[in-house]
Image: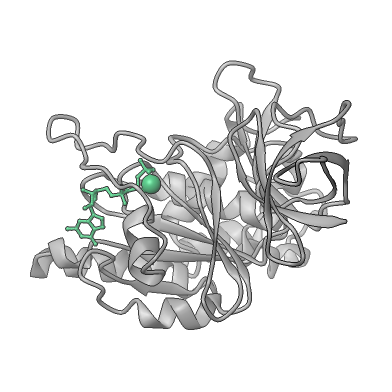
Amino acid sequence: MKGLVIKSTGSWYLVLAPDGTTYESRIQGKFRIKGIKSTNPIAVGDEVELLPEPDQSTAVITHLYPRKNYIVRRSINLSKSVQVIAANLDQAFLVVTLASPVTSLGFIDRFLVTAEAYDVPASIIFNKLDLFSDEGLEVLEQFQSIYTRIGYPCYQVSGLEGTHVDILLQEMANKKTLITGHSGVGKSTLINRLVPNADLKTGAISSFSEKGKHTTTFAEMIPLPGGGFIIDTPGIQELGIVDIEQHELAHFFPEFRERLNQCRYHNCKHINEPGCVILEAVEEGDIEPSRYQNYLSMYHGNETRN
Ligand SMILES: Nc1nc2c(ncn2[C@@H]2O[C@H](COP(=O)(O)OP(=O)(O)OP(=O)(O)O)[C@@H](O)[C@H]2O)c(=O)[nH]1
Ligand SMILES: [Mg+2]
Ligand SMILES: [Zn+2]
């Protein structure tokens, strides 16, 4: 029978069967997915063929069905391998905090590029609204306007206090939504608020480093009462941009993409070419300087392949 992987610890998987039963499952045989070198063969969100064992509480996974999409991060040690964070997503929500811990615009932009490349619609959740001073709120508005003007839905919430979280529930209804972001931004706290019986572990951030302590260690899918799933994930430090060729990068910036065919040269790199409409738009304030700077750093960085 077909099952949905709702939790993965790396050595075993919790798989949800169509009748609502969950099975602790192991993989039988070798799973190699063509095209990617991943450290984990199966991820949360995967659809698998499942064979219950005689005791009926455990099962073996015998087949992995093709993925609609997936999000990866680069493994820390093996730079060429990636870890599949989750598969078959309808959307991804990036939880961002401007302090405790700090989320940089570079991190947000790399996440958005990854989501574009893997065809996952992305939204940004600015969290810990309760911590903002009036000045802080102004900065928050500026940050948010960078992303709303290029079409990414943005929300300002406090997961701790429950401010403005109802709209998130509406947006997540009947969808599979990945929640990601740095450790300590409040992903698990927010999900506990949205799904009262989720009962996810949360952890204080370090007062010394202002960073989270990686409280969540495995990705997990939590069913929404009205249908759909939220996927809680361990905090990520950096997203590796994988499998993006340098010349494709501009296509994953929506505000670049809509202008690309107007550059004088069809192979324009948007760096210093005459007649480049991207450079013009940056100069005229139609493209945000931070977005362009992050394009350049991704273009030149070792995050893209030639
Ligand atoms: N003030 C305030 N604190 C929050 C809010 N949301 C979460 N926190 C606090 O931030 C800390 C980290 O919260 P978690 O929910 O564990 O963060 P996480 O993103 O799941 O972290 P990892 O599992 O390590 O990736 C906890 O001390 C929470 O109480 C919020 O909206 N406002
Ligand atoms: Mg967590
Ligand atoms: Zn150009």
Between 80 and 196, the residue placed more toward the observer is 196
Q: Quadrant of the N terminus?
A: bottom right
Q: Is residue 218 visible?
A: yes
Foreground of the two, 145 or 154: 154
Residue 152 to residue 97: above or below: below
Q: Is residue 12 left or right of residue 162?
A: right
Residue 63 location, x and y as percent?
A: 89, 43
Quadrant showing the C terminus: top right
Can you name the residue that lies furthest to the top here? 77
Up-down relation of residue 277 to residue 267 (above or below): below
Q: Residue at image x 46%, y 41%? A: 234
Q: Is residue 217 left or right of residue 134?
A: right
Taking depth in this image into account, of 112 and 294 the one nearest to the observer is: 112
Quadrant of the image occupied by residue 260 = bottom right
Measured as percent of width and height from the top left, residue 186 is found at 31, 54
Side (left or right) of 51 relative to 301: right
The quadrant holding residue 276 is bottom right
Task: Specify the quadrant of the image occupied by residue 155.
Answer: bottom left
In this view, 306 is above or below 19: above
Count of picture labels: 0
Residue at image point 57% right, 30% down: 301
Residue in view at x 54 percent, y 22 percent: 76
Q: Position of residue 195 (x, y in %)?
A: 41, 69
Please tell me which residue is depicted at 70% across the width and 26% down the height of the picture.
Answer: 39
Asked whether 225 or 273 is in front, the reply is 225
